[in-house]
Amino acid sequence: MALHGDTLKNAIGRTRQKWGWFVGLGVLLLILGGIAFGNLFIATVASVYVVGWLMLVAGIIEIMHAFGVKTWGRFFYWLLSGLLYAVAGFFAFDNPLLASAVLTFLLAVALVASGALRAWVGYSHRPESGWGWIVAAGVISVLAGLIIAMGWPVNSLWVLGLFLAIDLIFQGWTFIAVGLALKK
């Protein structure tokens, strides 16, 4: 047991020595988040291209995997799945505005569904402490999804970019906080 504790202390010590890298990465992410806030349309298109690349790569991997399966039924399943992924990735590159509209709509649906589920779970745990916070978080997610859905498809030009910018800024502050905590 002591060996495990020493290994953990060594790992933390090595991480503490790299605190500046955490702060530097945090600053870079803050800058990128500010740039994304400066042009939400470009940030939206960039996020659609990232999703497109991921889908294209996933499609190619699934197509390659199809040739490694032993039965025809599974071969066609993986081949069709891979082709659909690859085609969707291609369309994200070919028409990023349409792809952003589809992704924004899916985001709205996901927020409403996950928020409703979260609110239901919180409500079903109402005798327990903190259940109201879970319900409140669910209601906020539902409202965010409904607001996005009501502005769709016009808001699909900037919603994904806004989410990307907010995420970059929060990640930046998190890395800076971790780096400064490691320095102490």
Image: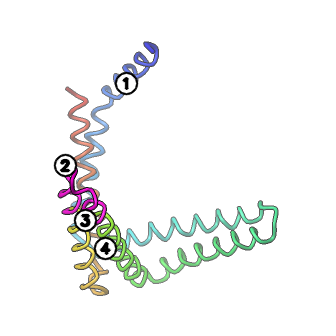
- Give amino acid for label 2: Ser
Q: Residue furthest front?
A: 127
- Give amino acid for label 4: Val
The image's mark for residue 14 is 1
Q: Earlier in the sequence, mark 1 or mark 2?
A: 1
Q: Position of residue 101 (x, y in %)?
A: 37, 82
Badge 2 local density, few (<14 within 10 Å), some, or many (20+)? Answer: few
The image's mark for residue 129 is 2
Relative vertical location of residue 98 with respect to residue 161 in this rendering, above or below: below
- Give amino acid for label 3: Gly
> Residue 130: within the magenta?
yes
Q: Position of residue 14 (x, y in %)?
A: 37, 24
Q: Which residue is the site of mark 3?
A: 138
Q: Position of residue 120 (x, y in %)?
A: 29, 65
Say how many tags the image has: 4
Of the 4 image quadrants, the one containing the N terminus is top left
Asked if the residue at tag 1 contacts the one at tag 4, i.e. Cβ–Cβ closer than 8 Å, the answer is no
The image's mark for residue 112 is 4
Apparent side of residue 168 relative to residue 97 in the rendered image (left or right):
left
Distance from label 4 to label 1 (Cα)? 43 Å
Regarding mark 2 in the picture, which secondary structure is present there?
A: loop
- The boundaries of the magenta stretch are 119-136
